[in-house]
Image (spheres, rainbow, N blue to C red):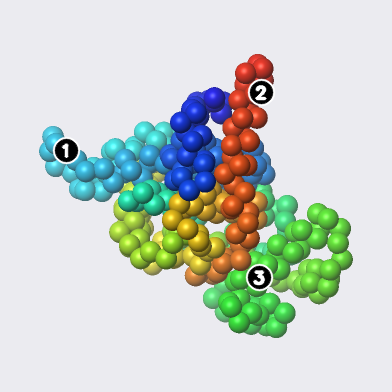
Amino acid sequence: MECCEERGITVTTEDLDCLDSGQFLNDVIIDFYLKYLLLERAPGPLAERCHVFSSFFYKQLTRRDTVSPLQPLRARDRRHQRVRTWTRHVDIFNKDYLFVPVNHKAHWYLVVICFPGLEQAQHEEWSGPAGVEANGGKRKCQPQASTGPSPEASNPKLQNGAGAFGQRRCIVSECINCELTGCTSSIYNSVCNVTGLSSLCRPCILIMDSLKISYHESIYKLLRDYLHVEWEVRRGTRRDFTVDSMKASHCTVPLQDNSSDCGLYLLQYVESFLQNPVVHFDLPLRLERWFPRQQVWRKREEIRSLVMELHGHHGNGGSSCR
């Protein structure tokens, strides 16, 4: 079974077995579904602004050297050399979102590197439903204003005890959904007429983990180091990715209620991000009500059905994931 594009991902019967209840997803299923999401489910303009790394990327980046290097190199240069060919066909600094699936001690979680090409936070004007199409296309950011109250502070309709970002995101989501469905809910009518909103584009590294685990500090440094060397190689200039210029944050996201669904949650985080992108990166992000848990419970059978459907098309001479 293959998901066909430039290079297909072969899914075997053994890979499908990990979709059984209580089983951990393996790297093949993770890579297959992430590729499917980007190629088939993400809106075209948004997909062009995203890059999904293979599940082997982080494993290769952090692999221990078994032999001494022939030339003395900085540790971050040695790490970069292991994965330098992974981006030979893509300039990641032209992307808005880089998705990095990570498996650490048999536990899957997601890293999202946002706006790696920006050197400082920038504001983008947001005008409600009229801005949905623009937000899905090319980014049009302006330097961040340093004066004046925030939209949330000046408009009580945007305030929420759980955090202004969470409410703003719900409002934008309602606006998008109402525009598409034609509904006239009170939320839509009262909020979508508000003008002067802006989304915040902030260079940052986000962790989305379905378990409350605190061992992520090292990954922030490793990825900042990777970006530092990749910039030098790709752009030929020096740029420091520091804790101030590339902030790190652990997002509040829906959590798993068992020991085996971490991979499913990783996939759902990406799917939700692509279907309803974050528009305001005011850290930390509060996404605990991003999707219902029942949506994750259905994911094993959804992926299995998708693989079988694509296999049927491929077997009949059709193409899949193209």
Residue lying at 62% horizontally and 18% vertically, measured from the top left: 315
Q: In this view, does 38 lie above or below 262?
A: above
Q: What residue type is labelled 2?
A: His
Residue 175 appears anywhere in the view: yes
Describe residue 40's horizontal placement relative to residue 111 as left or right. Answer: right
**Circle 3 or circle 2, nearest the eye:** 2
Q: Which secondary structure, mark 2? A: helix
Q: Residue 168 carries which label?
A: 3
Residue at mark 2: 313
Q: What residue type is labelled 3?
A: Arg
Residue lying at 61% horizontally and 76% vertically, measured from the top left: 164
Q: Residue 66 carries which label?
A: 1
Mark positioned earlier in the residue sequence (1 or 2): 1
Q: Residue furthest top?
A: 317
Distance between mark 1 and mark 3 Cα atoms = 49 Å
How packed is label 2: few (under 14 Cα within 10 Å), some, or many (20 or more)?
few
Q: Which corner quadrant of the image does residue 197 belong to? A: bottom right
Q: Which of 86 and 261 is in front in this view?
A: 261
Distance between mark 1 and mark 2 Cα atoms = 44 Å
The percent coordinates of residue 296 (x first, y second) are: 58, 53
Residue 266 appears anywhere in the view: no
Q: Which secondary structure, mark 1? A: loop
